[in-house]
Amino acid sequence: MRGAAPGGAGRSSGGCAVVQRKFAVGDRVRLTAEKHSVKSPQDVYTISRMLPAEAKIWQYRVKREGDGQEWVVSETQLVQVTPES
């Protein structure tokens, strides 16, 4: 469902620009929040669920690969894991 707009219809309402999702279920990410910025293997998360937008910002449920801890985070708190990170 990558690329869907908040509201689910793929259209903007009220003249707002359509904002596409940056991540899909299964993508590997890191949290950008300062307290979570340590680069160790257990700090890699996998997108486990796409959630509705809050304040026009997509939300995701992520699961940490090291210990299975889960968080709900906004798209602005995530960066894609690259092979060298």
Image (spheres, rainbow, N blue to C red):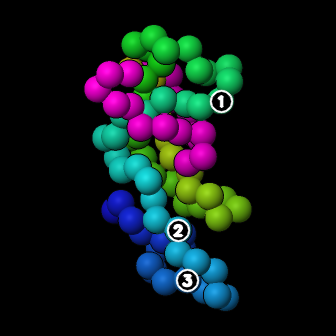
Asked whether 13 or 38 is in front, the reply is 38
Residue that badge 2 annotates:
19
| Residue 40 at x, y percent in the picture | 45, 11
Q: Is residue 63 visible?
A: no
Region in magenta: 67-85
Disc on the earlier residue, 1 or 2: 2
Q: Quadrant of the N terminus?
A: bottom left
Task: Please give the name of the residue rendered at 35% of the width and 60% of the height, measured from the top-left corner.
Answer: 2
Query: Callout 2, which amino acid?
Result: Val
Query: Callout 1, which amino acid?
Result: Ala
Task: Please give the name of the residue rendered at 64% of the width and 87% of the height, measured from the top-left corner.
Answer: 15
Q: Quadrant of the C terminus?
A: top left
Residue that badge 3 annotates:
12
Determine the CA span between mark 1 and mark 3: 29 Å
| Residue 80 at x, y percent in the picture | 41, 37
Q: With respect to residue 8, does 15 lie above or below?
A: below
Q: Look at the numbered disc 2 and give the secondary structure of its residue.
A: loop
State the mark number for residue 33: 1
Disc on the earlier residue, 3 or 2: 3
In the rendered image, residue 76 lying in the magenta stretch gets the answer yes
Q: In which quarter of the image is residue 55?
A: bottom right
Image-based side of 57 in relation to 85, left or right: right
| Residue 75 at x, y percent in the picture | 55, 48
The crowd level at tag 3 (other Cα within 10 Å; few <14, some 14-19, many 20+) is some
